[in-house]
Amino acid sequence: LFAGKSYAIFALLFGFTFYIQSNNQKKQGKDFGYRFLWRLVLLAAFATLNAAFFPAGDVLLLFVIVGLVLFFTRNWSDKAILITSIIFLLQPVEWYHYIASLINPAHQLPDLKVGEMYAEVAEYTQAGNFWDFIWGNVTLGQKASLLWAVNAGRFFQTAGLFLLGFYIGRKQLFVTTEKNLHFWIKILIISAISFAPLYALKELIMQNSAFDMWQKLAFTFVLVASFVLLYQREKFSKAVSNLRFYGKMSLTNYISQSIMGALIYFPIGLYLAPYCGYTLSLLIGFCMFLLQVKFCKWWLSKHKQGPLEHIWHKWTWMGTNK
């Protein structure tokens, strides 16, 4: 239900957040671009912390690298941003490799040795040495994660989602208006109708990862549009109101989940992985989520931002009075 979609929503909102920050600075006659580059450097440090506990699975460093596309396009027109986003989301590289494989059956994706890297990651993870685990994750693990993203088409898809989130912000599509609600209804219908055939094509043509990403993207917009529309209903908005506390501390929650997960599942901690199937793992994750929500509510009752958000904000605006 959420695999490949949560990451996409995360990427979409990354671009949307860039719009909010850059627009706030633009109102003051300032260019947020270079401050954003420094913010990406800081995010690389948080990515390293997260990667230390998340073997070959960190996405933040990918965001740091792909985030440069927002810097270079920040002054483009809305139309140019939308067109570029669509081009990225069409997965041109994946289509090149797929067509090349039809012309020449011997054609394959470049062998980046990702499988061998993941095998080595599994080896030191299972060994249970804490410092080998940390060092391996921030070196080999990050390399494996980035190279996997290259072969999986994540670089282009992430860039497209960043720009799409930026475009949504510029066009104020999350603002509640009758026109926007009609827009999200159309998005929901188109995405829901598109999902089934794209999923079928993905199953039929497994060599082409573009179909896999497209069907996940379609379902991502089913989730996003559904949430936007349901949020207009008072009962639903009240039921999910606590999510705003969680969202305000998203970086803290994301990294703390990696740390807690490592201590629960891997040999450096309780090593419960061999004893937890999908159902039990889901329950553990849900309980962890509820505990984080309670912690966020408590923390934000005493502080303006989460601990890591405060550090990121303070260091982003070094040399200013923000």
Image (cartoon, rainbow, N blue to C red):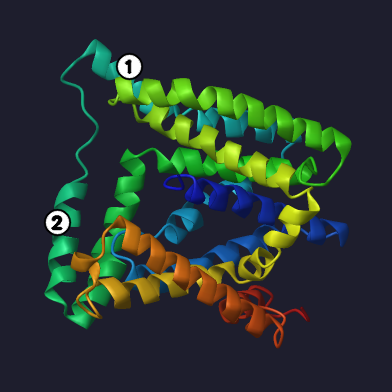
Please report whichever mark, 1 or 2, sits nearer to the chain's N-terminal start.
Answer: 1
- Bin the neighbour count of mark 2 within 10 Å (Cα to Cα): few under 14, some 14-19, many 20 and up: few
Q: Is residue 71 visible?
A: no
Q: Residue at x 21, y 48 (%)?
A: 114
The residue that disc 1 covers is: 99
Give the farthest residue toward the front: 235
User: What amino acid does circle 2 point to?
Assistant: Ala
Quarter of image, res 78: top right
Q: Residue at x 76, y 78 (%)?
A: 322
Percent across and percent down for residue 138 are 31, 69
Q: Left or right of 320: which side holds 40?
A: left
Percent across and percent down for residue 48 are 40, 70
Give the farthest residue toward the bottom: 302
Q: Secondary structure at mark 1?
A: helix
- Bin the neighbour count of mark 1 within 10 Å (Cα to Cα): few under 14, some 14-19, many 20 and up: some
Quarter of image, res 126: bottom left
Above/below status of 291 relative to 99: below
Numbered label attached to residue 119? 2
- Mark 1 and mark 2 in contact? Answer it, CB < 8 Å: no
Q: CA distance from mark 1 to mark 2?
A: 30 Å
Viewer-side residue, 173 vs 233: 233
Q: Residue at x 28, y 18 (%)?
A: 100
User: What amino acid does circle 1 point to?
Assistant: Ile
Q: Is residue 58 visible?
A: yes
Q: Left or right of 213: which side holds 121?
A: left
Q: Residue at x 39, y 60 (%)?
A: 282
Q: Secondary structure at mark 2?
A: helix
Q: Quadrant of the N terminus?
A: top left
Viewer-side residue, 5 vs 113: 5
Percent across and percent down for residue 170 are 77, 44
Above/below status of 252 relative to 160: below
